[in-house]
Amino acid sequence: MSQEPPSAADTRERQPNETNIRALVEAFYRRVDDDPLLGPIFARELAGRWDEHLAKMTTFWSSLVLGSKQYRGNVQEAHRPLEGIEPRHFARWLSLFLNMVEARYAPAAAVQFMEPALRIAQSLQLSKFGWDYQIPAEQEELLAALKRQRTGGNDEPRFPERPAGEPFPARFVGKPVDER
Ligand code: HEM
């Protein structure tokens, strides 16, 4: 058994809105900041600019998920100058993000964040590591599974099966969340 049916005790957000997106962004970057692998990169790049980054990321996710605010930026260009980024950084970023989204949003809302995150992570990895870079199969499989769920009917999306207690993305992005 790996997935609990929805219950009255499920307090996860069913509908993304600007307030809960802002809360997601703040919680995610607090988690990133604490992470031994990602924390130093963000600390180095965003010293003195965290507020600006959090506001920008709230606008970014609101644009994608709510179609409301206009994000004006270039995601590829923003990551191009970053030094020392390896595949494991993407695996960790995805692991933290997907896990946090699953904890905060009911599945139908969660996929609205997860699918673009995986898609954009793929294009960032291809531009960082070369167009012949092989995206980890787990990431491709998860993206394909989420797409099928979104387009496959009216049912509440069901995430791929996993052993009880295993963090959501671990099996799909390569490494357990707490593996340093
Ligand atoms: C290895 C994984 C990643 C690292 C280390 C990373 C790091 C960063 C850093 C340091 C910035 C700030 C750049 C600056 O303002 O100087 C940034 C911006 C940003 N990141 Fe990432 N990122 C990662 C993955 C992702 C992914 C998967 C997404 C897709 C959702 C994403 C979306 C963005 C966006 C939208 C911005 C703002 C771009 C702008 O300035 O308009 N990042 N990232």
Image: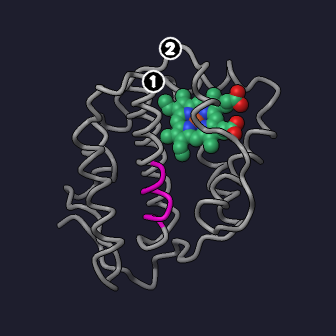
Q: CA distance from mark 1 to mark 2?
A: 10 Å
Where is residue 164 drawn, in percent x and y? 23, 58
Q: Residues within 10 Å of mark 1 (few under 14, many from 20)?
A: some
Can I make out residue 151 in this image? yes
- In this view, the residue in front, 89 or 81, is 81
How many discs mark residues in the rendered view?
Answer: 2
Q: In this picture, is 47 found above or below 31?
A: above
Mark 2 secondary-structure assignment: loop
**Residue bounds of the magenta highlight:** 110-117
116 displayed left or right of 58: left
Image quarter hosting the C terminus: top left
- Residue 124 x %, y %: 47, 34
Pointer 2 residue: 84
Give the residue pinned by disc 1: 128
Residue 134 rendering spot, x and y as whole percentages: 26, 30
Q: Quadrant of residue 108?
A: bottom left
Residue 87 image label? none
Residue 92, quarter of the rendered image: top left
Q: Is residue 103 above or below residue 46?
A: below
Q: Is residue 33 visible?
A: no
Q: Is residue 58 left or right of residue 176?
A: right
| Viewer-side label of 1, 2 | 1
Q: Is disc 1's CB within 8 Å of ligand 1?
A: no
Q: Main secondary structure of the magenta part?
A: helix
What's the residue type where badge 1 is placed?
A: Lys
Taking the image as four quarters, which one is ligand 1 found in? Answer: top right
Q: Residue at x 17, y 67 (%)?
A: 1
Magenta span includes 113: yes
The residue sitting at 66% across, 60% down in the picture is 63
